[in-house]
Image (cartoon, grey):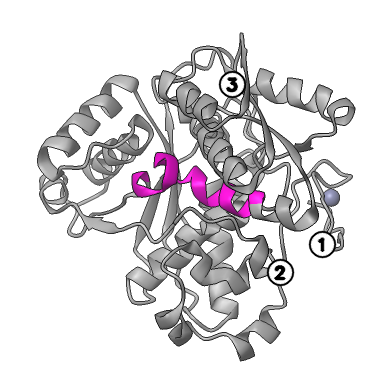
Amino acid sequence: MCSRNYAAGKPWNLCECGGPLLVRYDLERMRALWSRDSLASAPNSMWRYAPALPVSNQTSIVSLGEGMTPLLKAARTGARIGASRLLIKDEGLNPTGSFKARGLSCAVSMCVELGLGRIAIPSAGNAASALAAYAAAAGIEANIFMPRDVPQANFIECRAYGARVTLVDGLISDCGRIVGERKAKEGWFEISTLKEPYRIEGKKTMGYEVAEQLGWRLPDAILYPAGGGVGLIGMWKAFEEMEALGWIGPARPKMIAVQAEGCQPIVRAFEEGAEVSRFWDGASTVAAGLRVPKPLGDRLTLQAVRASGGTAIAISDEALIDAGIQLAEEEGIFAAPEGAACVAAVERLIAQAPA
Ligand SMILES: [Zn+2]
């Protein structure tokens, strides 16, 4: 936010100004040393893009096979809603069943590299499961704070991976506050969304993959279920890096942030023309991953959505559940409610578009 620089190779959380830190690379130099053709022999995981990830020592990498998820054709659903080519990036095939694996593979690898043995995270569920798995793989202590009504599967997974789990009466924002209050005394490194610079780096690999899987031509639009919004911010960052590397041109997809009606701070800010969101009071939705009343990455999400000519749209719980069932019946893809919200969103946006 203030353009201050911090040295690589040390643990950092937020900038002094309160803004998130973003990893910058010497893309000029990388352009000469790294070509997209070399990917043919790279690992079949998100670590195929390792030169554009912050881990400097290969032995630090903690990988469970995350990334390189398929782009599936959703032809029947596309035909029904009027999308000539609808593709679904199936992030459910990641370790622990969500895209959170990307961010936490990268963040836990950095903890190994930086010698951080105790980490803490607030989570609505999926990030907790992913952190617990990668921390187990790395032999690191994971301290997890989740709302008491978190999906039971996430709780069971975290316990199975040996994490220390605390259930909190409240929202993810309350969990975040507790981690913030206790971390100094406990000696935890906090890996809350965007409060460290590494998770976004893992998540940005979705952008590299979409480009590679489509033959280095980006789609017209990307609909993304925005809770914290980091995947959207990450993909936008990846496109910028890939252009600097000479891998893609200046064309960009419309970035469309999809939220739930019961918690839509980004949609409200977008419609109001605001640079940041306001806390969404009484946040409530079945899509637990979208229940983020005041995302720290709101400014960056809104910047990317606007710069791309995209939009922000909210879907009711009823509509996103219906869309999920319909997608499952038509395509054999039983998406999480968060992902299903994107199908409802694209249907509505096409229906509303001028003919
Ligand atoms: Zn700053």
The disc labelled 3 sits on which kind of residue? Answer: Met
| Residue 56's disc number | 2
The disc labelled 2 sits on which kind of residue? Answer: Ser
Q: Residue at x 25, y 49 (%)?
A: 354
The disc labelled 1 sits on which kind of residue? Answer: Gly
Q: Are marks 1 and 2 in contact (CB under 8 Å)?
A: yes
Q: Separation of disc 2 and disc 3 at Cα? A: 32 Å
Q: Which residue is mark 1?
A: 9
The answer to whether residue 121 is above or below residue 246 is: above
The answer to whether residue 53 is above or below residue 143 is: below
Q: Are marks 2 and 3 in contact (CB under 8 Å)?
A: no
- In magenta, the rendered stretch is 92-108
Task: Specify few, some or many for label 3: CA neighbours under 10 Å numbering under 14, 14-19, or 20 or more.
Answer: many
Q: Which residue is mark 3?
A: 146
Residue 147 position within the rendered picture, expressed as x and y whole percent measured from the top left: 57, 16
Taking the magenta stretch, the answer to whether it contains residue 25 is: no
